Amino acid sequence: MMQLTIWGGAGEHGRSSYLLQYKDEAVLLDCGGKKESGGQYPLISPEVIPQLKAVFLSHAHEDHSMALPLLYKHGYEGEVWTSRVTAQQLPGYYQAWSRYARSQAAELPYGDEHIAAIRYAYLEERSIADEWSSVFPGLRIKWGRSGHLPGAVWLALDWHGKLVYFSGDYTAESGLLATDEPLLGAICEGGDEADAARRSISETGRIADLAIIDAAYGANPDSQAVRLAELERATEEVLRAQGSVLYPVPTSGRGQELLVWASERFPEAQLIVERALMEPLHQLAALPEWLGDGALARMEALLANGRLTIVANEEERLKTLARKGSALIFTNDGMMQSEVARWYYEQLSGAARHAVLLTGHLAAGSYGEMALRSSVGSSDSSGCHASDFPIQVQHIRYKVHQGLPDVRQMMKRVPSRSVVLAHAVKPRTDQLLEVLEEEGYKGVYSLSPGDRLIF
């Protein structure tokens, strides 16, 4: 029998970390932080670290990666298996995480020497997407693009006769990124024609023993098209009132997708974009293997847009905001924790015709979350009310995770004896579980950090 221990990520949004154990061996999937209270970290058991045979990282986002140095602090000497693009992105995320901790007067639980100690092994150098390969004797893996971020992957592990699927953060509805459908299939040794035939026959027929599935949106049934229609209506309303819209977005991923979308849907509007968001766009354009059909042409059209203004300092921002007419403003930091995001908010707050559109997760106590609560009229912890800040603040999620129909589809693609729903707070996960059980699904679990599952 094999055991799963939730070190983080199930029953909560953040600190994704899933420990698999078989006898005296262990494998870890992700090791992230949670952006609350100055940083929350996985429930790492130091006595398990000597058992770790390998660590796998699905992608670079902080809630999946920022606790990796803790493993090395506790004595891990092995490699972190991930994509090369993910490894290249991580230094920027470590810097941002350090700034966040300082802004909260919190100390990091590890030092720069532990970040420097991390050794990476690249999935692309071991195998191509959707192809099984050996990591060490007894463990084979398969990976595919998850559509969440350049370099983001899902993983399948075949270990001691158990088949485990980990979706990472997954979406089949990205506007720019390609996604590989997870089809696990059997593992065939050798490379002759008979082996290839067996692989082809069995490719969709194998049942996983465990699947850890991104269910961040719980029972929400909306498609990406529905969310984009809501964003379009909200933006059009502001533009008709001669107002400007502030889009606070993450530095990589959702930010570039929404920027391309906005440039296409509102071709006459000014686009004011922080330089920090343009650098990842250029980097993405240089990664055709991670792009979906037509994505490169869409990005090139954005760069050729004559209404695009890129800014990098306060002088440039003030000069651009002083222009007549409405604008769509894109700044990095989706939770508005950064000084620049707050600066834009303060510049626009004096007029009700302007709006802030928040499109992703908002951690409790984040500036974006408090601005949203102030806008709808409730007091935040500082006593602010909607009357203090007449600017409109709305929360309309852009899909970079899975909701109810996506989870159903994934469970069909990856039939599993046990399914753990991940990446959502416990009430939302429980609600999704209730819906799935009513529909007849069995072996589905809503777990919490510290819980264990034998499979």
Image (cartoon, helix red, strand yellow):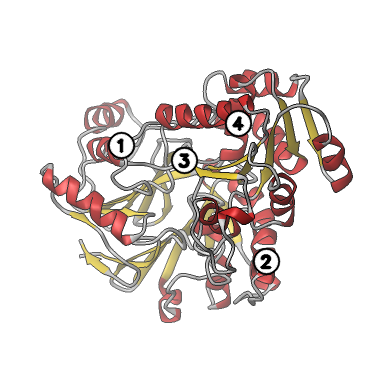
Work out whether mark 1 precedes mark 2 in sequence or the reverse, and give the earlier one.
Answer: 2
Check residue 400 in the rendering and tell me which mark sits there, or answer none. Answer: 3
Residue at (77, 40) in percent of width and height: 275
Circles 3, 2 touching at the beta carbon (< 8 Å): no
Q: How far apart are marks 4 and 1 (CA)?
A: 27 Å
| Residue denoted by label 2 | 98
Q: How far apart are marks 4 and 3 (CA)?
A: 25 Å
Work out whether mark 4 precedes mark 3 in sequence or the reverse, and give the earlier one.
Answer: 4
Location of residue 73 with respect to 251 vertically, above or below: below
Q: SS for tag 3?
A: loop
| Residue denoted by label 4 | 238
Quadrant the C terminus occupies: bottom left
Q: Hey, what amino acid is under mark 3?
A: Val
| Mark 1 vs mark 2: in front | 1
Q: Hey, what amino acid is under mark 1?
A: Pro
Residue at (56, 18) in percent of width and height: 294
Quick check: can you spot residue 274?
yes
Q: Hey, what amino acid is under mark 2?
A: Ser
Q: How far apart are marks 3 and 2 (CA)?
A: 25 Å
Residue at (40, 35) in percent of width and height: 130
Q: In the image, residue 7 lies at what x, y percent?
A: 39, 68
Quadrant the N terminus occupies: bottom left
Q: Residue 79 occupies which quadrant of the picture?
A: bottom right
Mark 3 closeness class: few <14, some 14–19, many ≥20 residues within 10 Å: many
Work out whether mark 4 precedes mark 2 in sequence or the reverse, and give the earlier one.
Answer: 2
| Residue 426 or residue 84, whichever sits in front | 426
Check residue 221 in the rendering and tell me which mark sits there, or answer none. Answer: 1
Residue at (67, 74) in percent of width and height: 111
